[in-house]
Image: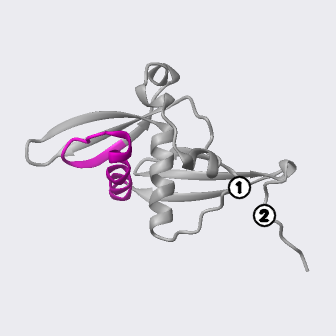
Amino acid sequence: MPSEIRRLVFYYSELSEALVNQAPEYGVKFPKGKITKAKIAGGIDNEIHTQKFQTNELSKEYNLNDDPKAIIVTFFNEDTFEHKYFSLSSEFVSSALIKYCIDRSIPLPRAGKKKIDITEFNICLDIVFDMDDGSSLELELD
């Protein structure tokens, strides 16, 4: 059966705002600077990740995909010209972006599996509806 995909694309400035707003809930303090890059790390980085056991209510409510990968975010401090790398669980990043959407009244379906993808200059929240599991949106053809 075919699948339906919705992709929300976020600039790194929006990712930064979403992460900073999510940080107090987890007790995380980010380095000073702007995000210049994000990449998906291998599964081994998530195995030792301290955030992998932390969940929040958005995880279940918005059907976050249990992704065993970590996201490495690069912060660049323009004052000191330093790059600092910060490793985050994919669930932390996903829930931060979902909360960002909710706070700005961006429509976001609760159904559908959500997962993170990264392009060259953006981070994406993909929402996948499998047609055979009943989570798709019903459309009528005239």
Give yes or no for contact between labels 2 and 1 (Cβ–Cβ under 8 Å): yes
| Residue at 21% over, 44% down | 76
Please report the residue visible at 83 percent of the width from the left and 70 percent of the height from the top. Answer: 139
Residue that lies at the very extreme toward the right in this rendered image: 142
Residue 96 painted magenta: no
**Label 2: how many Cα within 10 Å (few below 14, some 14–19, many 20+):** few
* Magenta segment: 12-37
Q: Residue at x 42, y 47 (%)?
A: 120
Which residue corresponds to mark 1? 111
Tell whether 31 sits left or right of 10: left
Q: Is residue 101 above or below residue 43?
A: below
Cα distance in 3D space between marks 2 and 1 = 9 Å
Look at the numbered disc 1 and give the secondary structure of its residue: loop
Percent across and percent down for residue 136 are: 79, 58
How many numbered badges does the structure rendering display?
2
Q: Quadrant of residue 26?
A: top left
108 lies left or right of 140: left
Residue 46 in the image, given as x and y percentages of width and height? 48, 25
In this rendering, which labeled residue sits more in front, label 2 or label 1? 1
The quarter in which the C terminus is drawn is bottom right
User: Looking at numbered disc 1 in the image, what kind of residue is underneath it?
Assistant: Ala
Query: 7 or 87, which is in the foreground?
Result: 87
Q: Which of pointers 2 and 1 lies earlier in the amino acid sequence?
A: 1
Amino acid bearing label 2: Leu
